[in-house]
Amino acid sequence: MQRVLRTSSVMALIGAQLASGIGYADSSPPEQWTLSRIIRRASENSADLKSLEKEVLRADHTAEQAGKWDNPEVSLDAGPKSISILIGNVFDASIRQNIPLFGQKSIEADIGRNNRKILETDKNIRAVSVRHQAARLAYRLAAVLEQVKHIGHRREKLQTVAQYLTTRPFASPSQFVEKNLIQNRLREIEEKFLAITASKEKVWHELNVFLNLDAAITPEMPWLTNPKELNREKLWDQVRSRNLELFRQNQLIEAAELSIAKAGKKGYPEVRIGAGYSEQNVELGERSYVGILELSLPIVDRGGYARQAAESQKDAETYRLEQKRRELLAQFEQAWAELTENRKRIALYPVSLVNELESAMSKAEINWKKSLVPVTAFLELESQVHEQAVRVFDAQTAYVEALSRVWLLAGLDFQPEAQ
């Protein structure tokens, strides 16, 4: 009996050390961390988004620079000049300016603006992704915390039962077996508690990559109780019209079309105009004024190969667009199937079921102490209660994952309130 009591004390000590070592509740800030607050914090603290904002700004400046005219070129020549025995001075001045008459500069600016739009789309894709990742991890963390709470409660109950067994003065052989069964189950619960605690820390650190906080938090998640079925056709229309990956692919096709147009500009001459003034006073004073018109001759390079390369690029991007449409349909069908399945799982395992299971377990414990329920039945119920409670929160997180994928495919933010 002393050995059993010592074992129970060791188990209790392990549990106390685990609870105090983690320090999760004590380190939580007093503020409420709602889903909207978590998503907002993740968006505001994303280094990726900040870097993409700078990339967009860089592309904007680059596009503006590409549309600027070239600077004029000024030439000045001066010096002494001699003809036989005559000595005098010569002065020449000229100015030249490139004139983009055939749209060379405007096409460069259009290419820069298109590149800016692609980067803007990349930023939007990342922004929506960050918000969805933060929402998923927040729900996962909240679910794990509920499981930690549940397993901790089960552990306390079994520790109480183990302690109760040590108080029996005359243990029969069957009671001795009961003690061993309870101790074995208590060990299993301790192992589950270790595993779920490690999982909690892992999920928290994944979420904190987005939040960048000094202390862990307890998310206040709106658990889904009766999610409505979405309109599949309407949602698919949104996916086809608003998917950001498709939008980006269309922008790549537009970039290829601009490259084709740029290659076509090689067939036009480059125009340069200018003016000059010349003066000399070696023999007789002379002054001359000239106008300058310079044209390049697009004879050797008319951009033929560049145009063919750009046309091939456009064809490649068009094929990629078709492939992305097919992949998008497959992803939507898969996400929709998972959404439908997990919506039904929530109906099977509602959050309210956890309290019902705990109540049933408490009644079973009372009846077991009265010898009305055998220990094997008590432990079997305890095992089922644990499994059912885990499934309750697994159903929640699985539904949230599927819902997030559907909204993400449609280019929309996570919207649990729409359910």
Image: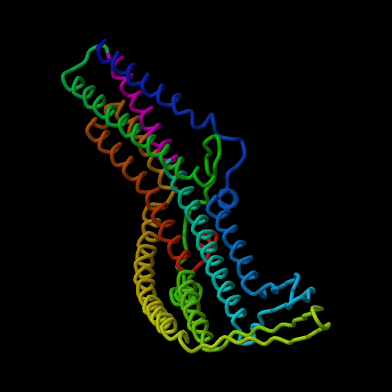
Side of 238 where 30 appears, left or right: right
Residue 369 at x, y = what percent?
Answer: 31, 26
Magenta stretch contains residue 161: yes
Membership of 391 in magenta stretch: no
The x, y position of residue 7, in whole percent, is: 28, 17
Q: What is the magenta range?
A: 145-168
The answer to whether residue 337 is visible is yes
Is 150 above or below relative to 414? above
Q: Main secondary structure of the magenta part?
A: helix
Name of the residue lying farthest toward the front? 85
Image position of 355 with respect to 25: above or below? below
Q: Residue at x 25, y 12 (%)?
A: 3
Above or below, comparing residue 371 to residue 111 in the picture? above
Q: Can residue 235 be seen in this snapshot?
A: no
Classify residue 360 by image quadrant.
top left
- Relative to 49, residue 273 above or below: below
